[in-house]
Image: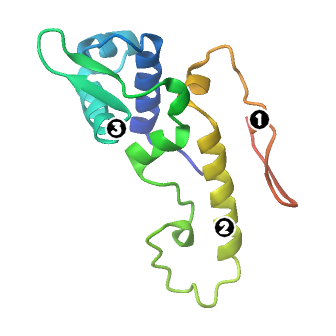
């Protein structure tokens, strides 16, 4: 099963919260209170988001965190990259491919195509779209991911 980690899920919730007031710094305590995520976890995730340049911070009495750029300019792919590294659904789809059977494999190319399609779908969804509570489904990926003639159903 393809599944994002709990920390990546939390990162999305935290970023979505920061997007609600993009011009105001918010402390980790404020973010924790607003999201229901424990403050130590919020602090840990915010540090990772800052390292990935998705959030910025300011120290001091009036310090806190905010998005480093507009929510429309942060993709779901960037969030996943920040917390989990680049999407690679198989060994041969990763940049550091160390597959021992690559020279005889007949399916690796197909998995790479699927991986690339997933990556493009993640790049096409912005934080503002993820955070938009009025969207229940995203039209581009709601029913299927198209890979040339191959169709893979996406279950809801």
Image location (x, y in percent) of residue 90 = 56, 66
**Looking at this rendering, what residue extends furthest in the right direction?**
149
Disc 3 is placed on an element classified as: loop
Q: What residue sits right under mark 1 in the picture?
A: 142
Q: Is residue 97 above or below residue 75?
A: below
Image location (x, y in percent) of residue 133 = 62, 15
Asked if the residue under mark 2 is in contact with the one under mark 1, i.e. CB atoms within 8 Å, the reply is: no
How far is disc 2 from disc 3 in space, using C-alphas?
A: 30 Å
Q: Which numbered disc, 2 or 3, marks the residue closer to the eye?
A: 3
Is residue 58 visible in this depiction of the protein? Answer: yes
Picture residue at 73% right of the left edge, 30% below the top:
138
**Mark count:** 3
Q: How is the image coloured?
A: rainbow
Picture residue at 42% right of the left edge, 53% below the top:
85
Q: Is 41 or 141 nearer to us in this picture?
A: 141
- Name which quarter of the figure residue 47 lies in: top left
10 Å neighbourhood of mark 2: few (<14), some, or many (≥20)?
Answer: some
Q: What residue sits right under mark 3 in the picture?
A: 53
How far is disc 1 from disc 3 in space, using C-alphas?
A: 29 Å
Q: What residue sits right under mark 2 in the picture?
A: 111
**Looking at this rendering, what residue extends furthest in the bottom direction?**
104
Image location (x, y in percent) of residue 127 = 54, 28
Asked if the residue under mark 3 is in contact with the one under mark 1, i.e. CB atoms within 8 Å, the reply is: no
Give whichever of discs 1 and 3 has the lower sequence position: 3
Q: Which numbered disc, 1 or 3, marks the residue closer to the eye?
A: 3
Q: Is residue 142 above or below residue 92?
A: above
Give whichever of discs 1 and 2 has the lower sequence position: 2
């Amino acid at each position: 099963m393809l599944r994002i980690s709990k920390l990546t899920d939390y990162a999305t919730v935290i970023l979505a919260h920061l997007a609600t007031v993009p011009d105001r710094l918010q402390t980790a305590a404020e973010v924790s209170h607003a999201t229901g995520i424990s403050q130590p976890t919020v602090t840990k995730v915010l540090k990772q988001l800052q390292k990935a340049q998705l959030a910025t911070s300011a120290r001091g009495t009036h310090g806190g965190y905010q998005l480093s750029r507009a929510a429309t300019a942060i993709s779901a792919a960037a969030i996943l990259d920040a917390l989990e590294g680049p999407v690679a659904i198989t060994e041969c789809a990763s940049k550091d491919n160390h597959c021992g059977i690559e020279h005889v494999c007949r399916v690796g190319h197909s998995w790479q195509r699927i991986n690339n399609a997933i990556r493009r779908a993640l790049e096409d969804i912005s934080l503002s779209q993820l955070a938009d509570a009025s969207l229940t489904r995203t039209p581009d990926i709601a029913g299927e991911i198209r890979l040339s003639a191959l169709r893979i159903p996406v279950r809801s």
